[in-house]
């Protein structure tokens, strides 16, 4: 029997978005997957088009709906996604492609600016290592301080924004 309500799990992965509809009694009632490309045209580059994520989400949602024999109300959504992937918004739209966690172009730039003493100091104070994998260094390298931007988001936070119009960052990602 199909449920009258379900929770939708959305995973914005590195190569595909995956959706899972789960009933209140924890049975998987539908699942779907839609792939998207990563741009690797330059050494160290790994970028994705945020609009491709949204198109893949729409396609996967249609697959979920087609698997349901009865309509079910979505009563909750759980989001997870590739980290850390940088999305820069100007007002409501991305200003360019997402810089994925696989991108390594900023590593040398960060190493030139951050020595081991500063890394240790920052880690003791904040519990976070400074390297090219984090959104702050990614933003500084790819956009620089002159970029006028509305928001700096992770991939998951961008998806939350696209679905709700709200901007929020998970505290575990904020640092």
Image: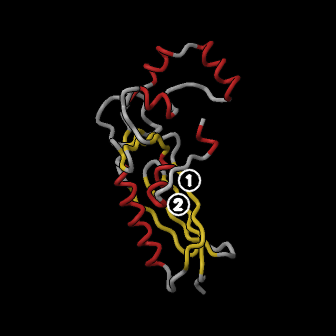
SS assignment at label 2: strand
Q: Residue at image x 64%, y 42%?
A: 172
Above or below, 82 against 18 in this view is: above
Mark 2 = which residue? 10
Answer with the quarter of the image where residue 73 lies. bottom right
Q: Is residue 38 visible?
A: no
Q: Report the front residue among 12 and 113.
A: 113
Left or right: 99 with respect to 74? left
How many C-alpha atoms fall within 10 Å of the one at disc 1: few (<14), some, or many (≥20)? some
Answer with the quarter of the image where residue 56 lies. bottom left
Q: Residue at image x 66%, y 24%?
A: 123
Q: Quadrant of the C terminus?
A: top right
Earlier in the chain: of badge 2 and badge 1, it is 2
Q: Is residue 51 visible?
A: yes
Q: Position of residue 113 (x, y in %)?
A: 49, 15
Q: Which mark is residue 140?
A: none
Q: Report the front residue among 73 and 152.
A: 152
Left or right: 51 with respect to 86? left
How many C-alpha atoms fall within 10 Å of the one at disc 2: few (<14), some, or many (≥20)? many
Q: Residue at image x 39%, y 58%?
A: 54
Q: Report the front residue among 141 and 100.
A: 141
Above or below, 66 against 81 in this view is: below
**Cα distance between the residues tagged 2 and 1:** 6 Å
Q: Position of residue 148 (x, y in %)?
A: 37, 34
Q: Which mark is residue 80?
A: 1
Q: Position of residue 53 (x, y in %)?
A: 39, 55
């Amino acid at each position: 029997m199909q449920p009258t309500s379900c929770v939708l799990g959305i995973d914005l992965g590195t190569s595909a978005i995956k959706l899972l509809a789960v009933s209140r009694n924890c049975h998987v009632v539908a699942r779907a997957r839609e792939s998207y490309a990563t741009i690797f045209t330059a050494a160290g580059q790994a970028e994705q088009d945020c609009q491709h994520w949204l198109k893949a989400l729409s396609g996967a949602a249609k697959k979920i709906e087609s698997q349901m024999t009865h309509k079910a109300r979505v009563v909750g959504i759980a989001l997870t996604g590739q980290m850390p992937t940088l999305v820069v918004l100007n007002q409501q739209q991305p200003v360019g492609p997402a810089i994925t966690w696989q991108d390594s172009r900023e590593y040398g730039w960060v190493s030139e600016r951050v020595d081991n003493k500063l890394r240790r100091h920052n880690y003791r104070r904040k519990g976070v290592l400074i390297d090219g994998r984090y959104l702050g260094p990614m933003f500084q390298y790819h956009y620089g301080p002159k970029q006028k931007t509305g928001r700096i988001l992770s991939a998951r936070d961008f998806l939350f924004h696209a679905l709700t119009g709200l901007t929020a960052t998970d505290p575990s990602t904020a640092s």
